[in-house]
Amino acid sequence: MAGDWVLGIESTAHTFSFGLVDGDGKPRPSASDTIRPTEGGIHPREAAEHHVELSTTLFNKILSENDLSPADIGVVSYSQGPGMGACLRTGAAAARAISTHLDIPLIGVNHCVAHIEIGREQCGCDDPILLYVSGGNTQVIARLEGRYRVLGETLDIGIGNMLDKFARKHGIPFPGGPVIEKKALKWLEANPNPTLEGLELPYAVHGMDLAFSGLMSAANKLVSQGVPFEAVCWSLQEHAFAACIEVAERALAHTGKTEILLGGGVACNQRLRDMSSIMCEERGASSHCPPRMYCIDNGTMIARLGWLEIKHGRTTSLVQSGIDQEMRTDQSPISWP
Ligand code: ATP
Ligand code: FE2
């Protein structure tokens, strides 16, 4: 008889990751590996090859780290979208193989919703406004009538993608976001009371939406004019994060909700976390951030969402188990409280 653990497989882009939740939905840290090209961006086919090569290793690793055998797995959950087609297909294929081999149910889940649900589980917040900031996505989300509705989002590239591209142009390999954070901190250490004078960039807010490519071009221009790179990193973070926090604050005001939950890889950034806390404090709301290992892409969040979906009666048959590169946050019905 199969056990009651849920295995989650994440493969939307650069990271291949296996995670687990137990029969009560309680998460365990993931076994993951991220492809880091020495030059250029992530190539979908190369990332997919990376994922295929690592699937057996990561599967064995997550089992041995938790002292489990394949028979303890009762459900396999995988990211059905959105993401890079070639990468998504590797995760779906691994999930189908495990499901068929162990004769256990399969569940395809929405990657964006998984970022939200692991955050809710970790932070214990009830009905938050979500600021989902990752490489590919930048969205302000609220739950309304059985869906996570997108109240505002980027009109061009994701904020993390913008940080990575800016970094890459200046010789920093993927992922650039954490390096920009360090450079900005270094600038702050040398300039404890910085001003934006000479470091102004365009502001990325358009109503409830955001846009980052103009900001990136302007930051590149500052560097080419000889402004110190670390100063530009600081200014870029200040402008991009303030724009996200402004839209999140307006979402709080419009909906009357009182919690902010951060999620996605860029939510690892301490400055963004601090800005969110300051904004929430000023308006009597609360700001919540999951641990960093659950902000970046991870299999555990896929397992957690799979656990919720199965508990509420949904499974994915083999014929439905294709991928959906363009899956939207508000496409998936949310039936749990
Ligand atoms: P999604 O499919 O949800 O868009 P993703 O593929 O972008 O996800 P994530 O792991 O959620 O993957 O996010 C990765 C992004 O997070 C990268 O752009 C990376 O630069 C950024 N990031 C990670 N840590 C930091 C940090 N400390 N500061 C800023 N950005 C960060
Ligand atoms: Fe992600």
Image (spheres, grey):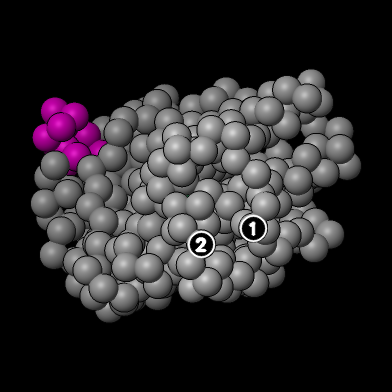
Q: Which residue is mark 1?
A: 198
Q: Position of residue 180 (x, y in %)?
A: 43, 52
Label 2 Cα neighbours within 10 Å, binned few <14 / some 14-19 / many ≥20: some
Discs 2, 1 touching: Cβ within 8 Å: yes
Q: Which residue is mark 2?
A: 227
Task: Report whether 305 appears left or right of 1.
Answer: right
Q: Nearer the viewer, residue 114 or 203?
A: 203
Q: Position of residue 222 (x, y in %)?
A: 55, 67
Magenta region, residue range: 62-75
Residue displayed at 24% across by 68% down: 37
Q: Is residue 4 visible?
A: no
Residue kind at label 1, given as amino acid type: Gly
Q: Nearer the viewer, residue 44 or 274?
A: 274
Q: Secondary structure at mark 1?
A: loop
Task: Report whether 169 appears left or right of 233.
Answer: left
Q: How many marks?
A: 2
Label 1 Cα neighbours within 10 Å, binned few <14 / some 14-19 / many ≥20: few
Residue kind at label 2, given as amino acid type: Val
Q: Is residue 101 visible?
A: yes
Task: Report whether 194 appears left or right of 45.
Answer: right
Is 63 covered by the magenta stretch?
A: yes
